[in-house]
Amino acid sequence: MTVVEICVEDATGTHRARDGGADRIEICQDLSCGGLTPAFDEVAAALEVAPTGGVQVLVRPRPGDFVHTRQEVDKVASDIARLAEAGRGASVPLGFVIGVLAPGGVVNEDASMRLRDAAGDAPLTFHRAFDQVEDQDRGLDVLMELGYDRVLTTGGDPAIARPRSLARLVARGGDDIIILASGGLRAHNVAEVVAASGAREVHMRAPGDCGTDQGEVERIIAALHRRSGGEQEKTLR
């Protein structure tokens, strides 16, 4: 079954995502700019009501590009350490979502290594800064060498999932790194993208009039269950 990660902005959204059937959540604030580091007390509240798959925290110090200064990388590393301490003893896993590029559309290897070290054993995802990497095959190789657990990506598009590109990354990553597919995914298209890309995990919002919509989460899960059931029927035949 495909793992579903829902992006939320608060503990209320976390609760709705969990009750809708999500496996895991990513928490951030200010989605209007692509997300920033959330308030630490909001993370603590989310941990109390999160799905069993846990909480991924976006750690991003400012809006704009992903070519961060040394001081900004210091801030990200410091926030990871403080969040890890706040999450110690939580009943669900706490992981981090980061991304640092160097000029020219390449992964900043030194900064990425430092943040891998800062995260310790916690799950670490390289976020959609990856979609600005010019050579994604090489970028994925670098992240595998550094021990990253996941890459959040559309396959290279600014907004929309590219199933062919995602499928290539899934094949290249194999069992060494998880491709967390994203890019305009909702209940109406998530099963199609999963089928075409082979992605084992998906990431999306479930927007409603009052933040995260539990009903949309339920529809996402139902769509993936229908696909899974159809695949099982084909296998039995």
Image (cartoon, grey):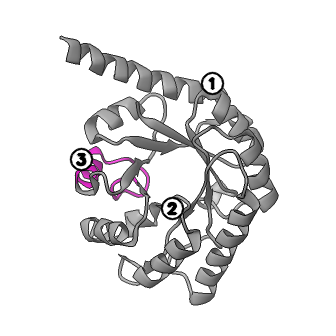
User: Is the residue 226 above or below the residue 19 in the image?
Assistant: above
CA neighbours of label 2 inside 10 A, class few (<14), some (14 to 19), many (20+): many
Task: Give the CA distance from mark 3 to mark 1.
Answer: 29 Å
Q: Which is more N-terminal, label 2 or label 1?
A: 2
Q: Quick check: is 44 in the magenta stretch?
A: no
SS class of the residue under badge 2? strand
Q: Which mark is residue 164?
A: 3
Q: Which three-letter amino acid code belongs to the residue tagged 1?
A: Gly
**What segment is highlighted magenta in the picture?**
153-171
Residue at the disc numbered 2: 124
CA neighbours of label 3 inside 10 A, class few (<14), some (14 to 19), many (20+): some
Q: How many marks?
A: 3
User: Is the residue 21 above or below the residue 144 in the image?
Assistant: above
Contact flag, marks 2 and 3 (Cβ < 8 Å)? no
The C terminus, quarter of image: top left
Residue at the disc numbered 1: 215
